[in-house]
Amino acid sequence: MERVDFTRTKVPLRARRKPLVILLKPIETERFSLVCLDEDFATETYLRWLADDETTAFLETRFAPVGNLQLLRDYVTSLLKSTDSYLLAIVTNETHEHIGNIKLGPINVHHNTASIGLFIGSKEWWGKGVATETVAAVTAWAFDTVALTKVSAGAYASNVASIRAFETCGFSREGLLRSQVSLNSGERDDVVMLGKVNPNA
């Protein structure tokens, strides 16, 4: 797997308009660094993740497959132009490997809210608490630094591990969208809506 020099960031992750804030350094957890996802992360490994039906089973990106590295670079470049979202690569502190992504956004500047979404591309890290650790860190950063009032998430009802991770981080179930999405099997699934309010807001 490709190693990433996450000490450099060619394109600092920042808002192109207020009130978003500049991410001046990685968001650190015990095992991971969350850094701006730029074109250097558009690797063969990332491409394989997006082509894997099991990895993308609960992602909307499965409906818009990325077929080659140039298309992946173009996709990442388009994400860098966002004015209302932070897209972060999850990089291991020990080996500097890119193992997945986590996103905060879009941020609604009128209501001071945002959503969180993530995926763990490296199956070697499945079931090892990556989601819990990174969601907790991004939520804390969203509250303490970005000063959001609330963050939300949605998860396929059959994605039990994701729902459990958010609940472990203090998110509450706020609703259920019945028969909201179609699975790869053709069956329908519900979407569980979760949210957490900034206790200091």
Image (cartoon, rainbow, N blue to C red):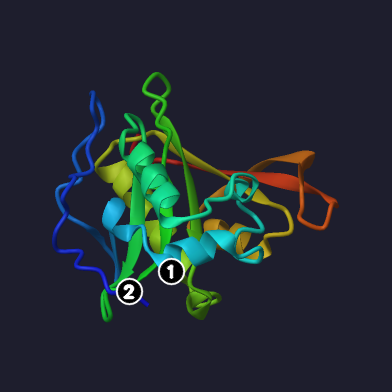
Residue 175 visible here: yes
- The three-letter amino acid code for the residue at tag 1 is Thr
Where is 35 relative to 125, above or below? above
Provide the secondary structure element on which disc 1 rests: helix
Q: Does residue 15 appear to the left or right of 82 in the view shown?
A: left
Q: Few, some or many C-alpha atoms within 10 Å of disc 2 (few <14, some 14-19, many ≥20)?
A: some
Q: Label 2 near label 1: C-beta < 8 Å?
A: yes
Instruction: Give me the residue at 31% from left, 40% from top.
Output: 80
Instruction: Give me the residue at 19% from left, 45% from top.
Output: 11
Instruction: Give me the residue at 14% from left, 59% from top.
Output: 8
Instruction: Give me the residue at 69% from left, 51% from top.
Output: 156
Q: Position of residue 108 (x, y in %)?
A: 42, 26
Q: Quadrant of residue 15?
A: top left
Q: Work out which residue is located at the far right of the displayed protein and give it.
A: 187
Provide the secondary structure element on which disc 2 rests: loop
Q: Identify the mark at residue 1; answer none if there is no mark.
A: none
Q: Does residue 88 appear to the left or right of 50 in the view shown?
A: left
Distance between mark 1 and mark 2 Cα atoms: 7 Å
Tell me which numbered mark, 1 or 2, is placed earlier along the sequence.
2
- The three-letter amino acid code for the residue at tag 2 is Glu
Q: Work out which residue is located at the far top of the displayed protein and give it.
A: 110
Where is 123 relative to 166, above or below? below
Q: Does residue 42 appear to the left or right of 151 in the view shown?
A: left
Residue under numbered circle 2: 2
Q: Position of residue 182 (x, y in %)?
A: 78, 46
Residue 168 visible here: no
Q: Position of residue 49 (x, y in %)?
A: 52, 64
Q: Position of residue 29 (x, y in %)?
A: 29, 67
Residue under numbered circle 1: 45
- The total number of labels drawn is 2
Q: Few, some or many C-alpha atoms within 10 Å of disc 1 (few <14, some 14-19, many ≥20)?
A: some
